[in-house]
Amino acid sequence: MASIRKVKTTVNRITMGMMLGAALTLTGCGKSDVKNEMNTSSQVQDKTDNSGFDLPYESFTLDNGLKVILHQDTSDPIVAISTIVHVGSSREKPGRTGFAHFFEHMSFNDSENVPKGANRKMIPELGGERNGGTWSDGTIYYEVVPKDAFDKLLWIDSDRLGFMINTVDKGTLEREKQVVKNEKRQRVDNRPYGHAGHVIKKALYPKDHPYNWTVIGDLEDLQAATLDDVREFYDKYYVPSNATMVIAGDIDLAATKEKVKLWFGEIKSGPEVASMEAQPVTLSETKKLYHEDNFAKLPEIRLTFPTVESFHKDAYALDALGEILSSGKQAPLYVNIVEKQKLAPGAYSWHRAEEIAGTFTILVRGNPGTNLNDIYAAIQASFDEFEKNGFSESQLTKIKAEQETSFFYEIESVLGKAQKLGEYNEFAGSPDFIKQDINNITAVTAEDVKNVFNKYIKDKHHIVTSFVPKGEVSLAVSGSKKADIVEEVVEQGAEEEFVENDAIQFTKTQTKHDRSEPPLSELPTLTAPQVWQTEQANGLTILGIEQNELPIVNFSLTIQGGQLLDDSEKLGTANLVALMMNEGTKSKTPKELEEAIGLLGASLRVMSDRESITVRGRSLVKNFDKTVGLLGEMLLEPRWDPSEFERLKQTQLTSIKQAKGDAQSIARNAYFKLLYPENHAAGSPLGGTEETVNAISLDDLKAYYIKNMSPKLASFQVAGDVSQQQVVSALSVLKDWKGEDLTLPVQPQVVTREKPSLYFIDLPDAKQSVIMVGKAVVPAQHPDFYPIVVANNRLGGGMSARLAQTLRIQKGYTYGAYSYIRGASYQSPFIASSQVRTNVTLESLDIFKDLIDNYQSTYSEDDLDVTKNMIVKGNARKFETLGQQLNVLENISRYGWSDDYISERQEYVTTVTLEDVHNTINTHLKEQNMFYVVVGDAKTQLARMKEFGYGEPVLLDVNANPIEPLN
C-alpha cells in the first residue's frame, strides 16, 4: 500500500492535545543506552496528571540495534505491533524509483520459516488485521491480533525482518511487479488528477534531490527491477538498527521483553544506515505547468511553495498558517474563492513537513468551465487580504481546541498508540520528544504566523499546476507549459507471464532458537459492550455504551427516511436539507456556529444517505453538554440562508459532474440502477442527478424538513465517558421537538434474474476496468442476512479469500478484489468487485464467474473452520474504539436488532454447519441469478466481451442508459 503520510503534521496533532490541559503523561526511559537490561522501576512511573490518564512505555535496544518500545493496555484482549523501517522513497536512486514501496510489497510474501502467503492469509484467519505503508521517509508494517495469536505475530514479524531475502525468486518478483503496477493504475493513472504529485515533484526538486520522484515511482523503473536490486536494498536498509518496533496492548511487560529478545535477538545487525540531512530547496522562478486530464471533469489549480523540514522552528507556524488560510468560513481563501466570487465549492491549504524538506500547498478544484486564471487571481487577493487584516486570536484558539480533541482520537486504539510512539522515536529520536514538541507548538504566536507567511509565501516563487478536462486547455493558467507525463499504453498480451515456485530452494539460516511456528495461547473471551436504552416522552429512542478509558464522547442522532422520502422528480432534497442544517441556526450565522463548535474542540456534522439523515458528533466529555446544546440548535432551528442554499446546490451539481470521470463511481451508480426496479429509491444515484438537483428550491427543503423530521423516527446513540443520567440530562434540549409518526414507503421487490447479463460502459483510454457482479439478497432485518454474511467470508471477505487470492496473489491482475453485503432495510445488495488491468478484463470476468458459480461445490469443512476462527477471534477487536461501539448502537437502532445481537451472532457462528452454509449459498448466491457491469476502454475490450458467454454485452452511457452498439 502506498501511503502518503504527513509525519510532522501528524505529530503536531498529537502534541497539541497537551496545550489546553489535555490529560496526558508520557513516561519512560526515552532513548536509552541500555541494551537488553533495564531498570523497570525507574522507567514506569506513577500517573502524574490530575486527569488520571497516562501513556507509560518501556524502551530498550537489542544488541543488533533494534529499538523496542512496549506499552501495556489491558482494555481489550488484543495486541498491536507497529514496525517503522527508516527507509522510504528518499533512499532510492534514479532509475530505481518506487523501490521502497515495491519492497514493502515483497516483504509480505515468503520468509524462511513462515509458510508461503502467511502474512496475507494467516493473520486475517487468526482474527487479526494487517497492512503496511510507504512514504518519502519510511515504511511501516502493522498488525492487530487477538492476544492468543501474539506469539505467532512475533514469529511472522521477526521472520520478515531477518529471514525473508533468501526466499525471493523471479516468479515472486514478477508477480509483485504486476500487483504494484495495478496499484499505480488504480491510485494514479486511472484517476482524475492522479499525476499531480509527479508533476509537482519534478518541477520543484532538482533531478538529484531525494524527493524528485513519487513514492510509487515510475513504471519503467519498476519493470526493470531485478533480484539483485531486491537483495541490495534489503541488505542495506532492512537492518534492525534502522527500525523501531512498538508492541502495545494486553501484554505482560517482562514476558514480552524476553519474547522480543528470543525472536528478534538473532537477526544480524547489518551495516549502519547514515541519517538524512535536511535538503530544503529554493526556486529561482515561478513555474507554470498544465495537463489535459483524461478523467477530470473539473479544472484544478495547485500552488506549491518550498518550505522547511520536520521539526524546524518555522514548521509549527506554517502548520497554523495552513489552517488559518483555508479552514472555516473566516478563512481568506474560503471568503474570496467560495463565498464572494463563487469560483469553486471549496479551497484548501496545508503544510507538509517531511524529513529533509517541506512544502506549502494551496489546492482549488473549480466549478465546471471556470478559468483557472480567475482562481489564481483570487488566491493572490486572499494573500493580500491576509497580509492586511491578519487573523483573530479566536481562530488560533479554535485550531488548538480542535487539535486537543483530535489528540485523544489519535491514540484511541492500541494500534494508534503504537504508531505514534514509533514515529516519535524513529524520526525525532525518542517518544519523549513530545515534551519539546509541545513547547514548540505552544510558543507559536500570531507574529510567528505572519513571519512565515512573509518568509515562504508572500511574493515567493512557486509551482503552479493546472489540471484541466480533456479539450479544455483554455482553462489553464496563462503562460503554462505542457507537463511531461508519460501515459502508459496497456496492450493486449504485452504483460510478461510469471510462474511462481511453491517450493523455492534456499539455504536456511542457522539459528540457536527454534523458529518453527509457535502455538496459540488461551483464546480470549468475548465481552460485548453493555448497552443501555431509554426513551424521551416525544418518542426519541436513546441508546448508549459507557466507556471510561479516555475523556471523549462519540454520538449520533439518526432520523429515518433520507432519500427514501425524496420526491422522485427532486432527488437530492434530503441531502441538501442535511447540508443546510450545518449552515447556521436561528441565532447563529454559519461563521458563528462553526466558531462555537470549534472553540469546544468538538465536531458536529449533518449528513444524509439513502435511508436516513444523521447528525454525527464528538467532543471532550467536559464539553459534551454544550456540544449537544449546539446540536439542538442545528436540529430545531436551522437558518435556511438563501445564499448558502445556492452555494450548496452548486456544490452538489459540481460533485455530480466530477463523479462522471471516476470509473468506480460510474460503475457503482450503474450497478444500483440495474439492480433495482425503476421506481425503487435505491436505483437512483445518492444525492440525485443534475436534472433533479436543478429542480430543487429552498421551499422544497423547508417542506421536507417540516414533514419528515420527527422524533418518532429518530434515535440518539452515544458511546464514551458519559453515564446514562448525563446523556438524558443533556438531551433535555430536545424535549420540545415534536413530529408525526410517519410510515416509510415500502420498496418494490427485485425480480430474480433467470440468466446472467453483461453490461459495458466505455471509459476511453482507461488503464483498468472496473468489474462489479451481484444481485439483490435480503433486508438486514431478515433472519438469513447474517448467514449470508458468514457464507460470503471465503469468497471475498478479505485478502485471504478466493477472489483476492486468485486475482491478486495468483494472477497479479489487480490490487484487490472483494465481495460483501451492504445492509439495507430493503433487499440488500450483494456485490463482488475489483479494478483489473485493462488487457485482462475478459480473463478476470471468467475468474469471477468460475469462483462464484463453483463456490458451493468447493466450500469445504476447512473453509468453515477458517470462517469460524476469523469471525469469533476477530470479535476481540470489534469494540475497541468509540466509533466501533457507536456502530453497534446504530445497527440496533436502524435495523431493530436486539441489544445482544453480537452474542447471538457469535452463537450462530460457533454452531453453523457445512450443510447450513451450502444451503445459504444455493439459496442466495447463485451465479446464474447475477449480472455483470464493466467500466473500461471499449476500443480495446468491447469485442472480447462477446467471448464471455452471456451474449452481446449491453452498452450503456455513463448514466447507465442504453445506447446503440459501437460500429
Image (cartoon, rainbow, N blue to C red):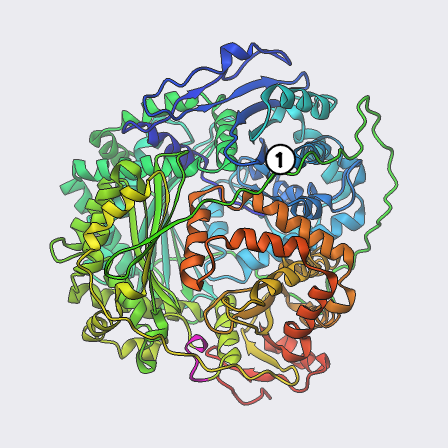
> In the image, 743: left or right of 670?
left
Q: Position of residue 296 (x, y in %)?
A: 44, 65
> In the image, 105: left or right of 632?
right
Label 1 sits on residue: 147
Residue lying at 53% horizontally and 56% vertically, measured from the top left:
188
State the extent of the magenta-drawn residues as a range. 678-683
Circle 1 residues within 10 Å: few <14, some 14–19, many ≥20: many
What residue type is disc 1 on? Lys
Viewer-closest of 116 and 150: 150
Q: Which of the 4 quarters of the picture holds residue 226?
A: top right
User: Is residue 368 visible to the viewer in this orientation of the structure?
Assistant: no
Residue lying at 49% horizontally and 21% vertically, measured from the top left:
430
Q: Position of residue 733 (x, y in %)?
A: 19, 51
Whether the magenta-drawn stretch holds residue 442 is answered as no
- 84 up-or-down from 34: above or below: below
> In the image, 176: left or right of 713?
right
Q: Which of the 4 quarters of the picture holds residue 633?
A: bottom left
Viewer-closest of 341 and 697: 697
From this viewpoint, which residue is outermost toward the left? 587
Q: Position of residue 811 (x, y in %)?
A: 74, 59
Viewer-closest of 397 and 824: 824
Q: Position of residue 72 (x, y in %)?
A: 53, 26
User: Is residue 393 visible to the viewer in this orientation of the structure?
Assistant: yes
In the rendered image, the quadrant that contains the C terminus is bottom right
Q: How many numbered marks appear?
A: 1
> In the image, 24: left or right of 201?
left
- 824 up-or-down from 336: above or below: below
Label 1 SS: helix
Viewer-closest of 597 and 473: 597
